[in-house]
Image (cartoon, helix red, strand yellow):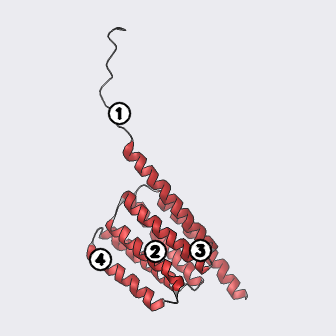
Amino acid sequence: MEEIGFRWLLGQGVSLLALALCLVAFASKRDDRLFALLLFANVAFATQFALFQSWVAAGISALIVLRIALVRRFPRHRAIMVGMLLATLVVAVLTWSGLRDIPALAAGLLGTYGMFMLRGIPMRATLAAAALCWVASNLLAGSIGGTIAESLIFLTNVVTMLRLRRDTRLPTIPDTPMPRDEAAG
C-alpha cells in the first residue's frame, strides 16, 4: 500500500509540473512558444500516466513529444501527419486495456490533426477539444492534478482564442492628422 501511495503522490506532483508548463504555453499567442513548452509538458504527462498505469495515455503522451518536434519542423506535412496518426493507433492497439482508453486515443488523434493542419484559433479550438478528452482520461486514471491541469488548459485555450480574435478586430489608427474645425480656426 505504501508503494501505491507513493506512486500516486508522485503522479500528482508530476501532473502539477505539467500544469504549470501548459498554462504558460497556452497563454502564449506565439505558436512556436506553445509547441516548445508543450514538449516538456507532455514528458511530464507521459510520466504521470505511467505512474498511474494508464498505458495508452502514457504511450500517446510520449508520442506527442515526437509529434510536436515533427510539426515544428514539418508544419502542414500531410504524409508525416498520417504517419503520426497511424503511430497513435499502433500505440493504442499495443497498450489497449479497455473502454477507458478511448478518451486518450481521441485526444491523440485530434491533437495530431490540429497541430499539423491548423494554426491560430482553429488549432487552439481543436486542442481545446483534445483537452476535454484528456480531462476524461485523467479522471479515469484517477489523476487529480492532471484533471485540473487539462481543465485549466481548456479554459486557457478558450481565453487565448478570445484574445486572438479580439486582436484581429482592433481598428487601426490612421497616421494622418485629424482635420481642424474651420469655424474654430
At a point 67% along the width and 78% down the height, the residue shown is 9
Q: Which residue is mark 4?
A: 80
Q: Determine the CA span between mark 4 and mark 1.
A: 43 Å
Asked if marks 3 and 1 touch (Cβ < 8 Å), the reply is no
Vertical placement of 185 versus 19: above or below? Answer: above
Pick the residue in front: 160 or 139. 139
The quarter of the image holding the N terminus is bottom right
Q: Which residue is mark 3?
A: 14
Q: Which mark is residue 105?
A: none
At a point 35% along the width and 83% down the height, the residue shown is 86
Tag 2: residue type?
Ala
Vertical placement of 88 versus 78: above or below? Answer: below
Q: Quadrant of residue 118?
A: bottom left
Tag 4: residue type?
Ile
* 4 or 2: mark nearer the eye: 2
Q: Which residue is mark 1?
A: 173
Secondary structure under badge 2? helix
At a point 32% along the width and 67% down the height, the residue shown is 117
Q: Residues within 10 Å of mark 4 (few under 14, many from 20)?
A: some
Q: Which mark is residue 107?
A: 2
Asked if marks 4 and 2 touch (Cβ < 8 Å), the reply is no
Asked if marks 2 and 3 touch (Cβ < 8 Å), the reply is no
Residue 95 placement (x, y as % from top left):
48, 90
Pick the residue in front: 143 or 99. 99
Q: Determine the CA span between mark 3 and mark 4.
A: 30 Å
Q: Residues within 10 Å of mark 3 (few under 14, many from 20)?
A: many
Tag 3: residue type?
Val
